[in-house]
Image (tube, rainbow, N blue to C red):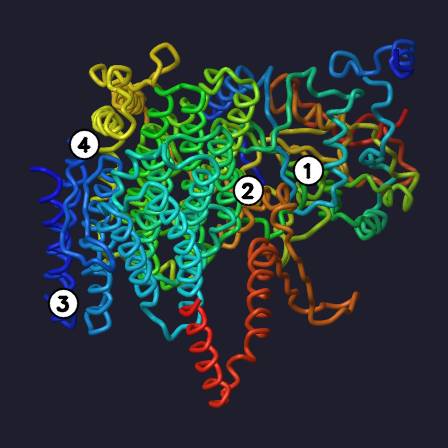
Amino acid sequence: MPLWSLQGLRRGVVTTRYPARPDPAAAAPPTPPAFRPEALTRDLADRLVAVCPSWALTRSNDTLIFDVGACTACGRCRAEAPGAVTASGEFELATTDRAQLVKRIPLLGRNVTANYHGKSA
Amino acid sequence: MTGQVAPGPGVQATADELRRTVARLFGRSLHIRTLDTGSCAACEQEIRLLAAPHYDLHRLGFFFTPAPRHADLLMATGPMIRAFDNAARKTYQAMPGPKLVVATGACALGGVYQPDAFTHGGVGEVLPVDVWIPGCPPSPLALLQGLLVAVGRLAEKVRDLDFIQERE
Amino acid sequence: MSAIPLMAGAAAAWVLAAAAALACGASRAGIRACCAVSGLGGAAALAGGVSSLLSGNSRVLTAGGSVVVGTLQLQATSLAGVFVALLGLVAAAIAAYVPRYHDPGHATGRYLAVFNLALLASLAVLVAGNVVTFLVAWETMALLCYLLILRRPWRTEVAAGAFWFLALSEIGFVLIIAAFVILAAKTHTMQLDLIAARARLVTGGWRDTAFLLALIGFGFKAGLVPLHVWLPEAHPVAPADGSAFLSGLVVKLGVYGIALFGFSLLPAGPAWRGILTMAVGAVTAAIGILYALNERDIKRFLAFSTIENIGIIVTAFGAAMTFWVYGQRLLWAFLLLAALYHVANHGTYKTLLFLEAGVIEHATGTRDMDRLGGLAHRMPRASVIAFVGTLGIAALPPFNGFVSEWLIFQGLFQGFRTGSHLIAILIVVAVATLGLTGGLAIYAFVRGYGIPFLGMPRTRQAAEAGEARQPVVGPALLAVACAALAVGAPVVLAGLARAMRTVTGVTLRPVLLPGNLTVIPAHTKFSGFSPTWLAVFLLAITAVPALIYLAGRPRAASLTEPVWDGGLVAFKSRMQYSAMTFSAPTRVTFDALYRPSVSVSRASDDPAGSSGPVHYESEATPVFERYLYRPVIRAFEWLADVVRPIQSGDVNLYLFYVFATVLVAYFIAAV
């Protein structure tokens, strides 16, 4: 009997159980960023917009418009402002409605000393 | 990234019925035809992995087919370069209805490339897209989730995500 | 009506047509008149041939002649009946074809005169009753055919092709004379039926030598390998009706000669005679079709296909002779019958295909398959008629080629009845070769019909082809004849069986079951099928699904989308198969036979940049010309060089020759 089949029997089934059970290696690849609104000022937002190579970020007054669909998870925005941007860990991003992928992040960082309680609208 | 109005109740009912029909027809057996409209082939490599033993899309009833005549779902990657218009349109027309179109990857969703003389900047300009899968490239699990959303076996998650990091 | 008056009428009609052609060939009405008379002659010959087939050998007619050259004797035999009928059909079809094919003029008038006289000479060969008549008619026919091929003698390739025909014909003629001389000397008579009656006087070595001389001599005319080289040279350069006549009839005269010697004049013989004939036939068939697959010129392709079919016929002859040696007289007569049926069939569809090749050449200006394409849209009538001919020659049911090849195969399959294991194995080898040939023939004719007629036009000439003033009646007549020969096969075979009783003395009729419309290969329990019912059945099974579809068609609206082509912008004609790429697999498999010489050259050898157009040339080595004929030709040239000093041009030397000859004659007379 060939060696690889014996090794396979020893290892067991490697096929993922997704979607019935979550896959342990799921969030290992890079994922789109998540933002901390209270850390975002207009200047920071403009810097993030400038650094994004994929036109996923734009600023409209006091809202950072983040197009998840255009994001390539390159990590430049996180490198630019590690305090304001982290990896979201989300990869199940499919949708039937393109507009659902355009997220609005409020820029609450004008006052860095203000406390932040709860989510903002 | 076109703005979409919320659909009225009648339209919603039709959409629901369509979704049920799609789930009935394709839920357990779906034939996928991939279409590379000018991508860097990273998405294609992830799509290829779907047939590998670790992800194994065959256990879900999904199969790849090269012939559009046999395909139910068109999986389009790449920013839809203008030189490919004719081939993309012909591929879509060759598929018998009912059919679905899945735009895969950041390029196909409008990122990475802006529209210019050589590219449309997104697959949605030429094909009527049903499901959008972000990622660059989307991991095989993300692709699986996208396909399962397309056939109605999984609910969408991204509506409820706001990409705002909670302060602990 | 009996045979002789009909044939005499045909002969008279052809003489009249020749005269008419010479007199008024310059006008279109004159050509039409000449062809009308010629066509009537053809019809008379057809009737006469059928009549002589059914009524048996007629009396020998003697007419004139002198003591020196012998008398002119004519006899209508059953064996020749098939060939005379074929001659009539071919003549009638070509007569219908000529008015729209040739332009009026003095050259055409002369050509038509020569053609009608060639018809007359062919008829004379077939009804010759004694050796001298036969030989005179044969040589006349050969010379007239040479003139036929030379329609446009100012072109070099025409002169070369015609010369090949004439040279090989003359070599064959010498051997034929030798064979007849042996027979006449041994049986002390010049009359063919008396020679046949006294055949047992020709014994042993003389008999076999005569047969071999006849096989080779008539083989030159019939086109047996390696004596076939004139066929691909002469057919492309002759006008279409000339090529049709050559392939449709003239090579059959060679077959007639072999049949005459093998079955009529020298029926008895050793086993190796039949085996040799069968081997030669099988090799001819295989090589013929293999070379056909390598040809782009439609007429060369058809010429090689003729060689293949002649091979099949001669294989059947050989097997028949072998069966006679082992006492299987039924199979002997049956295979002769099957071979003669194939002669009739092949004459019909090959003539048709050559005439259509002429139509294509006139419509598009080229004979090269790789410059054609899509003609089925531009020339629908021609494509339908050519399709009938193609189905016939590819031996597809229910057409006539299928029936005759089935009969030949079934006869060969019964080789086990000979009782000798060796012979049975040899016959099986021949069957295998014919099987290979049959498969390659279908391949070749898919290519031969598909490349010119189907697909997209490859050149502007093909795209602009039209069949506005092309001849259609002649080829259509032959297409109808093909269908009639197929569906009416039981009737035709009954007639041929009656002829076989005359030729071989064997009664085949009870074992052909024509009353049931079923044909069987000589022995009842071996196999059988009905061509008529097969044709009906095939029509029915194509009609039934069509009817079901029409009755049960889905009522919902249906969507018509273009064929999935891989997303191309548009198909281009260069994306299609070409004739040579379609047959590339055979060139690869049989490269030991073709020995292709390949040369590739490019404008520059710059590896980094563009090197300009690449020139690729591949040519199959002409094996027979190079390794058989060239050495013989060079030997003769050497001999001529050696002998040349005799012709020094010096008058004194010539006078010395005269003196020496007189001296020698004097001494001989004195002694």
Give the residue number, with chain letter if any, for mark 4.
Answer: C56
Residue C411, quarter of picture: top left
Give the residue number, with chain letter if any, for mark 3.
Answer: C28
- State the separation of the CA atoms marked 3 and 4: 41 Å
Query: Are the two marked residues, 3 and 4, in contact with CB atoms closer than 8 angstroms?
Result: no
- Ranked by sequence position, the earlier of labels 4 and 2 is 4
Residue count near mark 4 (Cα–Cα under 10 Å), binned few <14, some 14–19, many ≥20: many
Chain of the residue under label 4: C
Q: What residue type is labelled 4?
A: Gly
Q: Which amino acid does label 2 sit on?
A: Gly
Looking at the image, which is closer to me, C276 or C185? C185
Give the residue number, with chain letter if any, for mark 2.
Answer: C566
- Residue C10, given in percent of the width and then of the height, sits at 13, 50
Chain of the residue under label 3: C
- Residue C430, given in percent of the width and then of the height, sits at 51, 30
Residue C569 visible? The answer is: no
- State the separation of the CA atoms marked 4 and 2: 65 Å
- Find numbered disc 3 in the image and state the secondary structure of the residue it sits on: helix
- Ranked by sequence position, the earlier of labels 2 and 3 is 3
Chain of the residue under label 2: C
In the image: residue C156, left or right of residue B68 = left
Q: Which amino acid does label 3 sit on?
A: Arg
